Structure formats: structure tokens, C-alpha cells
Image (cartoon, coloured by chain):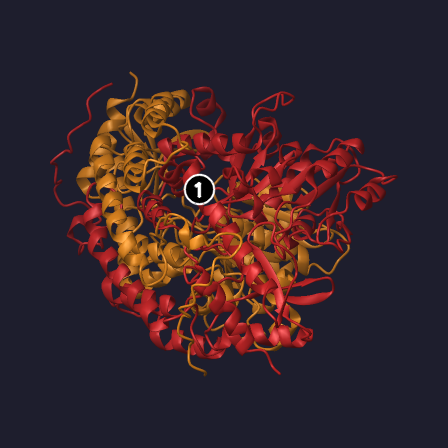
Chain colours: A orange, B red
Amino acid sequence: MSPRPSPTPERAAPTNPPSPALAPGPPPLAGGTQGPDALRPLLHTVLDALHTGATHRAGPLPAGGPDTVAAHLRDRAGDLLPTRGTGPHHALRTLVTAVAAGAADPADPLCAAHLHCPPLAVAVAADLAAGALNPSMDSWDQAPAASELEALLTRTLAHEIYRPHPSAPTPPDALVTTGGTEANQLAVLLARETNPHPQPVQLLTGANAHHSLARAAWLLGLPAPITLPTPGGTLDPAALDAALTGLPGPKLVAATAGTTDAGLIDPLPDIADITEHHGARLHIDAAYGAGLLFSDRHAHRLHGLDRAHTVTLDLHKLGWQPVAAGLLAVRDTTETTALTHTADYLNADDDTEAGLPDLLGRSLRTTRRPDILKIAVTLKALGRTGLAALVDQVCDHARHLAHLVATHPALELYDTPTISTVLFRPTGAPDSHIAAIRRNLLTEGHAVLGRARMDNRLWLKATLLNPHTDPAALAALLKLVEGHTPR
Amino acid sequence: MSPRPSPTPERAAPTNPPSPALAPGPPPLAGGTQGPDALRPLLHTVLDALHTGATHRAGPLPAGGPDTVAAHLRDRAGDLLPTRGTGPHHALRTLVTAVAAGAADPADPLCAAHLHCPPLAVAVAADLAAGALNPSMDSWDQAPAASELEALLTRTLAHEIYRPHPSAPTPPDALVTTGGTEANQLAVLLARETNPHPQPVQLLTGANAHHSLARAAWLLGLPAPITLPTPGGTLDPAALDAALTGLPGPKLVAATAGTTDAGLIDPLPDIADITEHHGARLHIDAAYGAGLLFSDRHAHRLHGLDRAHTVTLDLHKLGWQPVAAGLLAVRDTTETTALTHTADYLNADDDTEAGLPDLLGRSLRTTRRPDILKIAVTLKALGRTGLAALVDQVCDHARHLAHLVATHPALELYDTPTISTVLFRPTGAPDSHIAAIRRNLLTEGHAVLGRARMDNRLWLKATLLNPHTDPAALAALLKLVEGHTPR
């Protein structure tokens, strides 16, 4: 290679327009060799503000309910676009403190409503580098190394699901998404695009499936899904068989490994058999459940996962990543050719022929941040055993909470948890009480619990994703519910 | 409000399963009052690794081309999922250094190919808080304060475009997206969903429009767009008028304010007149150009922008945000009702009636990180005048580079830049030389320049988004091109 030119010391004679060098200095950038020094004092301010905000909040979420919290935020935030700026430290201190003080913080053991995990510090720290370098994953010349790291990571994760699968003509791979919703959307899109028939693909799901699947069919102009009742919480193979029997045209079955409401796993091997028998395509939404793969104790629950054409993963659930960390794994890399797309400025044919990688077909997005960096750092830092320990811990917490509920005189347990979701309710309470208990806990800033309808009754839902939770916190959660139950 | 319960000191008698408290301590979380202390040493490691990587790279991108860069990355990264982890500092140091050493860093003045901006340190620092708190914008109980900040910010930005617009029945607003691509996709979706006619919406764009518009029509199951030739680089009002005349059915015209290839702005007022005359709907993709609104010197170029039903903005272009920072502004808030969507676990009717905000209709995503925090901090820190200064600087840089090209004996200038894109080529060189110059500069690690086809010829493209660029760097860029021009 030829030597790099030394920067020309040329300061040209005055030109028209006037030299930009005369303008006042712009604020510092995050990149380059000077970025770290520029970031350091700003990060101190952010960490201080996060601490101040969490201290002010002093609990899992702010007290007072939506109107009060919104009013506080508005008061603290002030004018978001003043004529003259307040400077970086003031703006960071003001807004980060306000958002932290008004957060529902999943790092608090009493914040346990949703598949909304507390991210690991190591993942959040790694994500800072994604922002500072700001690679964009849509072309090689915006992400030379990051794009290779993405290729390594997606193959690594795809092989977690599809390990050795001799029938696949090409290796498995995975596409990076903004979450389970986009992954499910892509799964339906790939089914639409690989469908050789003139009739549109008919999606079939259980009533327990994530809402994003029906929304994907709507978005993509496909018929509304056929929704099979799931009275027991999971997709019944016999009901699926009956629905597929005699149904004309191309079909996509979407099963779930880790339902949002109860953390249940559909009977995957039976569903795969039936789907195959009817010549239908199979997608499995394992946004929640896929994390079990890391655990020797729990991976067996996902038996049959590798029989799906596509699988949704979401490492901002059982992966302890900050949002976003979604993926769609595909059994066969060639599936993704449906996304092939050309834009001359990003992947002109002659550039591709000359060896510049063509990355545009790996997403429906164009500009795209490297969400894989934080995932790769976390996997490498913790290893499979470290991730397994976290998975096992939250599953243990759920079993412990279920035990506390089951032995509690005034509480009813829905069922032994499959993953880390525990549904329970004060014995004999009407549904309206369940909903009110949840809202009161939220409004008073005491706890963040979710809700789910199962067996045609409303339940309180604790989704345990915090590995630092302990038995005392779990007992405190039940005491709060007890204290808020109307008599 | 009732007092918060003090954590119960209960350490229950041994239960079945064994108490999770006995397990080895999991790695620290980023949230809570302890998160900042856990993050501090990890962030030191990240900043050191960013500095080391940038020093190793010693230029705008790594030398050697795709295969060499990929091999280096693989060597450095090693096993991404080892059985036992390497610990957080080792993993951060290894992978962040590798990605930084192999980055195309837009903070380097010689990295100037794409609408790929160098983010401000203040924005990147603010984004750390988004990761640490990990709010998810799909329900109030995951983002009590962040959701209110998003509402404030989106209204603030929408009013930058739609200020006072008396004909609008409801106020303007904006939806947060992953970038211009998703914003354009949403714009086409809103057109599809607000279309009262049985025929599908027909999209019309110029050949200068971003590829994401045609991709959106494909995604959404709409007819392929009618693409009008744009020999002069912008959409010709007369050609648009001719295309709309006699065209049956509902129509959506998409104009561009800041083309990807040349930074040109379609004649917005004329296009708005014609679109209105034909009863068509108007979308303007101002992903690049919208930043001009902050500048008193340049805002006039966007005259007519407020006549569009929807406008794409992208503050990871002229807004100096790390990806993602996209928005779709809507003239009338009621437009967004097409996205109304219910999922009982996130926005049950009784919760909404009881006053919990319903956030699910603000995006096609479900889980969604608060990309608005970094934007809000940046706007507040810099103020309108600070942002205007950055916009003015990059526009001045472009005019300066154009002047250097125009007065250079061996280079040809495409045109005076409208925003901050400069197209040029060695005089008389065939297209194959242009493409080869670009690839050689990339492969040798000397410069990142783009390419664009205009006037049926290929040009080198410099998209100047770095406010720290100076005349010496711009002159160096031209010297590099000169030195790589085959004779």
C-alpha cells in the first residue's frame, strides 16, 4: 500500500466564501482519537445524573401516576429548543436526571411487569462504543469491521438454534432486528416472498401468539391470520391439524416459545410434525424463550425449535441487553435472498463485483446501528456458562415466587412457571380488583406488575428477569399486593 | 400516597427450590442507584479501547480492503461464545478496539462518502443514559418520564416544520423511527390506510427519490411506484403534472428535500400546488434537508415543506446524532390513528380509561428505545443557534470544496452545492476510472468518498457533514483523488 499523505499544511489565500476555519469552534465529536477525551467529562455528568435521578425516585417507578409524572418531567425539561443552548453539562444533568427520576427501572426488583430486562453494565458500556463510532451497517464503507463482527455473531447465534442440521442446503444465519416485532414481521415477509403460489400466504397462530404477528399480516397486505383458541395457554396440535386439514393455498404456522402472557412454550415437536405433514411453513417466535438455549438445565424445553424455517430471538429479554437486540434466525441462508435490494450509492454492481460486500439485503432498514457489538461483548465476557447462570437464576426466582404464592393463604397461583413468568391473584378477587391493584401499585410508585388474561380470568403477572432479585424482594412484592387488595 | 414499604428483612427458612441468594453473584446491572458505579470502570475501558483502536487505524478507515479487514477482525475477536467468559474488561477491550481499528470513522475529515455523520460527544453521552435506564416506549409503565419527553420533543420538532398552520384541524406531531427508511415506509403506510377508495394508492416519485420509497411500496403490497425521470436532478413540476393528469385512483406524490446523490431539493411549492390541484397526497422526504430549518441562512430553501401531509426527518444526518434518530412529522395528529393497535398486556381498554397513556399506536415497533433522549439533550445543549452554526459550517465547507474543484485545472465540478454534497470528477476520465479511484482510496485506507450518477456520468461524491473539517483537509482530499487518477 502507498504511504498515507501527511496532512497538507496549505492554508490557501482567502477564498470566496470565507474560510470556515474562522468560524467559532463547533462542539466536540465522539469519534476519532480525540473523542474519548471529549466524552470522559460528559459521561461523568451522565453517571452523576443517573445516580441523582435514581436516588430521587427511590423505588421502582415514580409515584403520582401519569399526570404527575408528566408535569414533573415538563417542569424539569423546560424549553427543548431554546434560541441559545444551555451547554452540554447543564442539558445532560437536567434531562438525564429528569428521565432517571421518572423511570420504571427494571434494575429494581419490584419492577417486574414486562419482558423488559435490566441490562447488564457491560452491555450498556459496549453500546457506548457503537454510538461513538457510529458505523452504519448498510454498506462496507460505513462499517468495515462492524459488518464482519455482525456476520460472525449472527452465524454464531444461528448455530445455537440450528446445530448440526444436515438437511439444510446452505448454512443457517440470522438477521438483526429492532426486536421480536420486526423479527416476526420479517418472518412473515420471507414467507410471502418465498411463496411460489398465486394465492397469498395464510398465517395461522394461536390466540397466545404475540400481537405483532397479526400486525405483520396487516402491514404486508396479507389476509388476517386464522387464530386458534388456546384455552390451556398453548397451541393445541389437534386443533392445528384440524385447521390445516383441507385449508387450500400456502400456509404459515407461527408457534410461540415463551408466551408474553404466561411464558408458556407451545408443543414444538408436535407442531413441527403437523406443519410438515400439511406442507406448511413454520415460524417459531422464541423472543422470550430462546435464551433458554444457553442453559444445560433448560435448553431441552426448546426441543423442536430447529425444525422451524425461521426463529425470532430477542436478547433484550433473556439476554440482558439494552434495547434493541432482536434477531431472526433462518434455517437456510438462501431464504434471505428475498431481501436482496440494490441502491447504486450503496451496492453498485461493479463495486460488488470488485469485492465490496453487499450488505443492503440484510435488513429492511438502510442506516442501521451495530446492535451486535453489545451482544458480542456480553457473550464473550460471560461465556455460555455465565449466561446460563443468569437464565437459571431467573427461572429459580420464578419457582421461588410461585412457591411463595402457592403456600400463601390468600393468593392463588396460575401454574408452576415454565420460564420466569408467575401469574397469581388474590383468591376470589374479581377481575376489576386485579386491574385496580396493578394500577394502584403503579400510581403510588410501589411496584410495576403486569396483567394477563388466562382461563378467562385476569391475573397479576410478575415477569422475573432481574438476576439480582432475592427472596426478600419477592416476599415484599407479595406483601404489597396483599396490602393493596380491597376487602 | 402511602409510604413505601421498607424491604422486609425476611430470610425465609430453606424453601424448595433452593434460595437463589446462594448462587454466585451475577454481573452488575446498569440501572438503579448502583449502576453508575458499575458502569464507571467499564466506561474507562471502553474509552481507552476507542482511543487505542483509532490510533491503530491512523486514518479514516483501515487499509487493506474487505478481506484483510475481515481477517483482522476475526483474529482479534476470537471465539464469540466461549464456554467460560473472558470477563467484562477483556471482552470490551478486545472487541471495542477491533471495531474501532476497523471503523470508517466519520469524525475523520477524509471520511465523507455518505449521509453518515460524526455524532457529537454530547449526543453519544446522553444515549448512554437511554441504555442504562432501558425504558421501552410501548407502555407507560416501562417509560413514565421518557414517554412524556418523547411527546414534548416530537411536538417541538413537528412545530419546526408546521408552524402556524391554521388549516390543520388538530396540531402537528411526529413519530419516532429508526431512520429515513422507516419514516418513508410509515408515510406510505399512512397513505394506504387513510385512502378511502377501493383502488390501492399509486405512489409517484422522481428517479432522484430514495430507494426506500419503492421498497416501502413493495413491502406494503402496493403497486410499484411510477418513477419520473429527473435529468436535472430534481422532480420537474411539468412532468409531475403530466403524470398525474388522467391518472385514476388515489395518488401519493413523494418529493425530496435533499437528494442522496447530490443534495438537491425538489421545487417544493410548485410540487405542492400540482399535487393539491390533482387531489393527491404529498409526502416530502427531508431526511437530509430538514436540518436546514435550524438555520436562518438556509431555512428558506425548504419553503413549501409545510404543505406536505407527512415529512421525513433524520437527525442522524444534519443533526449530528448517533444512529438512530429518524422521525416522520405529520401535519395533523389524527393521521396517526391508522396505527392504533391494542394488546391487552400493554394498553387494555380499562387501563386506558383509567388514565394510563396508550403508547402502542406511535410506532410499528413494540419494544422501542428512547432515541429522543439524545436528540432532546443535543437541542437543549446547543440551542437553535448552535445547531444553525453547525449547519452553516458544513454548507460553507461544501461551497469551499466546490470552489477548490472549480478552480482546479484537472477537476470538473458538477454544480454549486445546494446543501453539503459536492460532486466532482477528474476532467475527461471515463466512468470506470471514477469507480476505481473510489475503490482504491477505500482499499488503501486513504479516504472514504461516495459515488453518484448524474447527467448520465459517474461522479465522486463528498458528503460533508463534519463541522470540524477545515480547508487543509478539503485540499488534501482533492490531492488524494489527483494522486489516484490513472493517466
Whether residue B43 sits left or right of residue A172 in the image: it is: left
Residue A153: image x %, image y %? 42, 66
Q: Residue at x 51, y 51 (%)?
A: B396
- In the depicted structure, whether residue B30 falls above or below residue B457: above
In the rendered structure, which amino acid carries the disc numbered 1?
A: Leu
Asked whether B337 or A186 is in front, the reply is B337
- In the depicted structure, whether residue B408 falls above or below residue B383: below
Q: Chain of mark 1?
A: B
- In the depicted structure, whether residue A439 falls above or below residue B132: above
* Residue at the top extreme of this rendering: A487
At label 1, counting other C-alpha atoms closer than 10 Å, the crowd grade (few under 14, some 14-19, many 20 or more) is many
Q: How many marks?
A: 1
Asked whether A309 or B236 is in front, the reply is B236
Residue B305: image x %, image y %? 63, 36
Residue B387: image x %, image y %? 44, 42
Question: In the figure, residue A83 lies in which quadrant?
Answer: top left
* Residue at the front extreme of this rendering: A13
Whether residue A444 sits left or right of residue B268 in the image: it is: left
Residue that carries the numbered disc 1 in the rendered image: B387
Asked whether B80 or A293 is in front, the reply is B80
Q: Secondary structure at mark 1?
A: helix
Q: Residue at x 66, y 61 (%)?
A: B414
